């Protein structure tokens, strides 16, 4: 499986107008973080987790020519706002796009993109087919996803394990039962917003503590705020098996 980090930032992670911090002024491409999302290439299947506001820019940059399905972690706008731009794949592939998410997330999509689900469908709008997700493992185009229930402050959301790879973003608590679903993953991606504690995201030290407990062979930090600092500085401070992800990074799992 090939994993491409389409975006590793947050709405605080992209360059901020008028901000003079070292990240926003950095010329290092690894500090230019679009909203968080990943692309999975599993055999001949192409799957994306989350479509934030930068979705179109991300798939153009990575030249993702086919897309078989979308999977959502939760309903916040920085993870869903780009859904409209799947219409190009509808046109090229001449089929509806399978979209997976828990019932609450799918209801939110219906509300925010009501024109997609209207009785009278305007020509050229995105075409989707919704598939509700529960805590039970499910298949996406023959690829097994195991949901990992994590807490985003008081909002329960999903991370996912696919084979030896686990992807978790927007979390600040993982129960012991859910950690058991993660254990044995060779690669874990986990959010690390900033140095200081946050109400709904792991801080850098909190994320490192979780990863030390779960002991993956390799781990990558994502959902990074500009408050965390420059890539070249943070990378030097991390344990040997933990890395700061960046937009466009590709790994094999």
Image: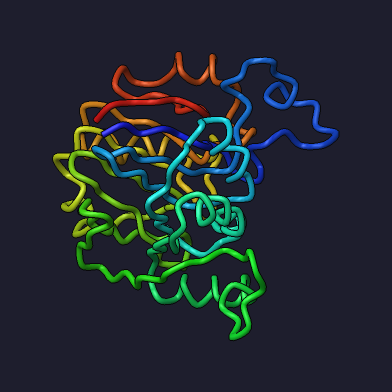
How many numbered markers are drawn? Answer: 0
Q: Nearer the viewer, residue 31 or 210?
A: 31
Using the image, determine if residue 216 lies above or below residue 94.
above
Quarter of image, res 253: top left
Q: Nearer the viewer, residue 185 or 5?
A: 5
In this rendering, position of residue 84 left or right of residue 239: right
Q: Residue at x 59, y 86 (%)?
A: 119
Q: Position of residue 192 (x, y in %)?
A: 47, 39
| Residue at the spot 58% in from the left edge and 35% down from the top edge | 60
Screen quadrant of the N terminus: top left
**Residue at image point 53% right, 37% down:** 7
Percent across and percent down for residue 47 are: 37, 47
Q: Is residue 228 above or below residue 84?
A: above
The image shows residue 71, relative to residue 217, as above or below, that is below
Q: What residue is at 42 percent from the left and 69 percent from the top?
A: 129
Q: Position of residue 163 (x, y in %)?
A: 18, 43
Q: Residue furthest bottom?
A: 119
Q: Nearer the viewer, residue 221 or 70?
A: 70
Residue 57 left/right relative to 232: right
């Amino acid at each position: 499986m090939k994993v491409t980090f389409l975006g590793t930032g947050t709405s605080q992670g992209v360059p901020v107008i008028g901000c003079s911090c070292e990240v926003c002024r950095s010329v290092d491409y690894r500090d230019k973080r679009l909203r968080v999302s990943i692309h999975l290439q599993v055999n001949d299947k192409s799957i994306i987790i989350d479509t934030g506001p930068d979705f179109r820019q991300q798939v153009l940059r990575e030249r993702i020519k086919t897309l078989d399905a979308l999977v959502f972690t939760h309903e916040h706008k920085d993870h869903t706002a780009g859904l409209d731009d799947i219409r190009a794949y509808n046109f090229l592939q001449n089929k509806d796009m399978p979209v997976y998410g828990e019932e609450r997330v799918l209801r939110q999509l219906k509300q925010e993109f009501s024109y997609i689900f209207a009785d009278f469908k305007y020509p050229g709008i995105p075409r989707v087919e919704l598939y509700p997700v529960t805590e039970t493992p499910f298949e996406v185009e023959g690829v097994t996803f195991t949901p990992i229930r994590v807490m985003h402050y008081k909002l329960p959301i999903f991370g996912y394990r696919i084979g030896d790879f686990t992807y978790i973003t927007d979390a600040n608590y993982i129960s012991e039962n859910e950690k058991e679903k993660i254990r044995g993953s060779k690669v874990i991606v986990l959010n690390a917003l900033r140095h200081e504690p946050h109400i709904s995201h792991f801080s850098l030290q909190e994320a490192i503590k979780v990863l030390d407990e779960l002991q993956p062979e390799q781990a990558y930090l994502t959902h990074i705020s500009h408050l965390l600092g420059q890539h070249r500085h943070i990378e030097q401070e991390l344990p040997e098996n933990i890395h700061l992800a960046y937009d466009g990074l590709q790994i094999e799992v």
